[in-house]
Image: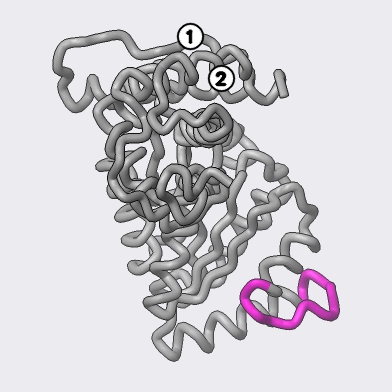
């Protein structure tokens, strides 16, 4: 409804993980490179972690898009609250393999035979599991055993486990020690830095057909950064509602007052970054991790209030 009013062809702040809208920061680029390297070089287990709302699923969808272009077969499990048979059922179906009979031993035999055939033909295969923090310890052990499907020199199945920071805590438990030891590469997603937000907004608007006219004032952008903690999901939430409210009140340029109204409506805490001198790389990473922790608190509060 507001698209034409703001010179757009579609919703630029949809919360769906559309890879077209992935804003590639330095950290996103590093995480993508880590995942691609691990998969293409058959490294086995690869871990991706990041606070809720920081773009893990969008990044994974971008990865899947890239893998398909390279002819790499993939299965993407996005519902991690499954028992073992359900998990194997989803995985085989996504690989395009028959799921009947639904007996684990026979499903494993079919998978192993197919993986061997793909490997002998020069193909690479990857299993991606999102929301991995919800996996049971029993299922994590079953997933670990999948990496036993191998030749004398290489893994037949590459596995990406993506989850929130608490997944790393789960991996520290003694019951999954062997899985933890098999993780060869680790990537992370972070909230956006203050100087990245204007570019993030511009990139999403451009993908949505933006004609370049000013929509968010500089002060509005500052308020969005302060109250979102740089979390893309919260940024999208604020901006989407700002466009709807702006259209309703015929405001072509959205100012800080409208953003503040939305901040109060969503009861967002003031957990904004404080001004700091230039940081070293290590300090910057530590600051982003702190911001990510605050981001998690903010997202949990947002879920409770709605």
Q: How far across and down, in percent of the image, does residue 118 sit? A: 50, 85
Q: Nearer the viewer, mark 2 or mark 1?
A: 2
The crowding category of the residue bearing disc 1, from other C-alpha atoms within 10 Å (few below 14, some 14 to 19, many at least 20), is few
Q: Which mark is residue 28?
A: none
Residue at 39% in and 33% down: 190
What's the coloring here?
one colour
Q: How far across and down, in percent of the image, does residue 143 sit? A: 63, 57
Residue 294 showing in the rendered view:
no
Relative depth, front residue between 44 and 129: 129
Q: Is residue 136 above or below residue 231?
A: below
The crowding category of the residue bearing disc 2, from other C-alpha atoms within 10 Å (few below 14, some 14 to 19, many at least 20), is some
The residue range painted magenta reads 94-106
Q: How far across and down, in percent of the image, does residue 175 sit? A: 65, 39
Residue at 36% in and 30% down: 216
- Name the residue carrying label 1: 270
What kind of secondary structure does the magenta stretch mostly adopt? Answer: loop
Q: Determine the secondary structure under disc 1.
A: loop
Q: Is residue 134 left or right of residue 100?
A: left
Relative depth, front residue between 61 and 293: 61
Q: Determine the secondary structure under disc 2.
A: helix
Q: Is residue 16 above or below residue 259?
A: below
Q: Where the C terminus falls, by quadrant?
A: top right
- Name the residue carrying label 2: 262
Relative depth, front residue between 53 and 186: 53
Residue at 56% in and 20% down: 262
Q: How far across and down, in percent of the image, does residue 305 sit? A: 71, 19
């Amino acid at each position: 409804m507001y698209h034409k009013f703001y010179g757009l062809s579609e919703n630029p702040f949809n919360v769906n993980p559309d890879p077209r809208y992935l804003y590639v920061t330095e950290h996103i680029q590093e995480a993508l490179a880590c995942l691609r390297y691990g998969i293409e070089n058959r490294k086995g287990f690869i871990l991706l972690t990041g606070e809720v709302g920081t773009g893990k699923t969008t990044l994974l969808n971008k990865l899947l898009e890239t893998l398909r272009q390279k002819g790499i077969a993939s299965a993407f499990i996005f519902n991690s609250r499954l028992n073992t048979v359900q998990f194997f059922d989803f995985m085989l179906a996504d690989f395009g393999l028959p799921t009947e009979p639904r007996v684990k031993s026979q499903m494993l035999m079919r998978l192993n035979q197919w993986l061997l055939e793909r490997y002998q033909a020069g193909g690479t295969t990857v299993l991606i599991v999102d929301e991995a923090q919800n996996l049971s310890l029993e299922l994590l052990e079953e997933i670990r055993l999948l990496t036993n499907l191998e030749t004398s020199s290489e893994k037949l199945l590459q596995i990406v486990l993506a989850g929130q920071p608490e997944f790393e805590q789960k991996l520290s438990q003694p019951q999954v020690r062997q899985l933890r030891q098999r993780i060869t590469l680790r990537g992370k997603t972070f909230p956006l830095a203050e100087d990245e937000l204007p570019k993030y907004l511009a990139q999403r608007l451009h993908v949505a057909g933006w004609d370049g006219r000013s929509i968010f004032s500089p002060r509005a952008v500052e308020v969005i950064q302060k109250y979102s903690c740089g979390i893309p999901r919260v940024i999208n939430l604020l901006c989407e509602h700002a466009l709807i409210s702006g259209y309703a009140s015929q405001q072509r340029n959205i100012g800080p007052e409208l953003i503040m109204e939305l901040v109060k409506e969503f009861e967002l805490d003031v957990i904004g970054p404080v001004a700091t001198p230039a940081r070293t790389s290590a300090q910057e990473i530590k600051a982003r991790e702190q911001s990510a922790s605050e981001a998690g608190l903010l997202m949990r509060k947002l879920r409770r209030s709605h």
